[in-house]
Image (cartoon, helix red, strand yellow):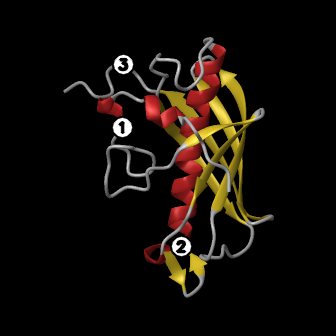
Amino acid sequence: MIDIEHAIQDDYGDDFAWCYGCGRLNEKGLQLRTGWEGEKTVTVYMPHEEHMALPGFVYGGLIGSIIDCHGTGSASLALHRKNGHEPGDGVEPPRFVTASLHVDFVKPTPLNGPLKAVGTVEEIHPKKFRVLTELFAGDKVCAKGEVVAAVMPDTFLKK
């Protein structure tokens, strides 16, 4: 299993680190971590028994959450790199929100091992990126997804 030494989520400011899927400060969340593997993006997650749909298989909502947060994290990685930065360089990365999420379930996903999301990122607008993701259990593709991620507006958290 790949170890992501420094994930993009490690650099999100504390105000933006609470997402159920990828927020490092959300103790009850999944705390997904996304990094580079060559020119692809990767997120690895070990599902737990509470993520069960049927005995031995992962609940589809978990798969959707992984693809969703992998997509926004991947977009953040891509724009951060485009701006001349990498995770861990001391510069806070841009944050994204999900504009659209599409998931196709290819085959049942076993609960007994790590899941690996592998993404390909393409810029489709200066403030939007499309991330195509394949979710693997071992060497088998169990789901495919597409996320369109939009740069989070400055006013997103203002009350």
In the rendered view of the protein, which quadrant contains the N terminus?
Answer: bottom right
Q: Residue at x 64, y 26 (%)?
A: 78
Residue 105 position, x and y percent, is: 69, 66
What label sits on residue 56 in the rendered view?
none
User: Real-space Cα distance between discs 1 and 3?
Assistant: 16 Å
Residue 86 position, x and y percent, is: 60, 21
> Quick one: SS at disc 1?
loop
In this picture, is 60 found above or below 122?
Answer: below
Q: Label 1 is placed on what type of residue?
A: Ala
Q: Which residue is mark 2?
A: 59
Q: Is residue 127 visible?
A: yes
In the rendered view of the protein, which quadrant contains the C terminus?
Answer: top left
User: Crowding near pointer 2: few (<14 within 10 Å), some, many (20+)?
Assistant: some
User: Real-space Cα distance between discs 2 and 3?
Assistant: 34 Å
Quarter of the image holding residue 82? top right
> Quick one: SS at disc 3?
loop
Residue 92 position, x and y percent, is: 44, 20
What label sits on residue 17 in the rendered view?
1
Q: Label 2 is placed on what type of residue?
A: Tyr
Residue 14 left/right relative to 34: left
Q: Which residue is mark 3?
A: 154
Are the residues tagged 2 and 3 within 8 Å (C-beta)? Answer: no
Q: Label 3 is placed on what type of residue?
A: Asp
